Amino acid sequence: MVEKVYPMTEEGKLKLEQELEELKTVKRGEIIERIKVARSFGDLSENSEYESAKDEQAFVEGRITTLENMIRFAQIIDNNNVNQDEVSIGKTVVFMELPDGEEEEYTIVGSAEADPFAGKISNDSPIASALIGKKIGDEVSISTPGGDMLVKIVRVG
């Protein structure tokens, strides 16, 4: 079976490692304590605190497994062999939507560290997929769920 590779920046991997450490050392202990307290209330069949703590425990254990997998199969992006003006994972790209000239800026990251609200989009997203490999000055047609848009790459950094 071929494992999925998770492309990410060094910074992204470090954040995942920090989250994993927090879940293992702090969150697990908090949840175990909540379960102990809830058990002391007696009848577990009608104990919402117990059910809530068990649900949270299942979520945290699932997240720990996911993070361990992402870290184990992390592929750190190395842009040393990529031209300075070429869009790739780990770089920030500024493009202008044509014809109205509205500029947008995104950092292209692996799916493991994507955060659209922070301007970090996954390399698997329609926008990033269309832009990767293109250079400053290129005009690119991007197909999005909201329709096609034409953009011109202004800066890559």
Image (cartoon, rainbow, N blue to C red):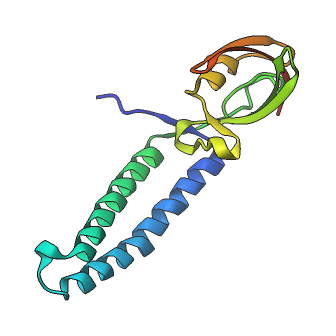
Q: Residue at x 69, y 27 (%)?
A: 88
Q: Quadrant of residue 82?
A: top right
Point 26% across, 86% down: residue: 37
In the image, farthest residue toward the bottom: 40
Q: Position of residue 126 (x, y in %)?
A: 60, 22
In front here: 6 or 81? Answer: 6
Q: Quadrant of the N terminus?
A: top left
On the picture, is 137 further left or further right than 81? right
Q: Is residue 155 visible?
A: no
Residue 138 percent location from the top left of the image: 82, 12
Left or right side of 127 for 105: right
- Residue 29 rendering spot, x and y as whole percentages: 36, 77
What residue sits 66% from the left and 45% below the top? 117
Q: Residue 60's quadrant in the figure?
A: bottom left
Q: Is residue 118 above or below residue 105?
A: below
Front in this rendered view, residue 111 or 97: 97
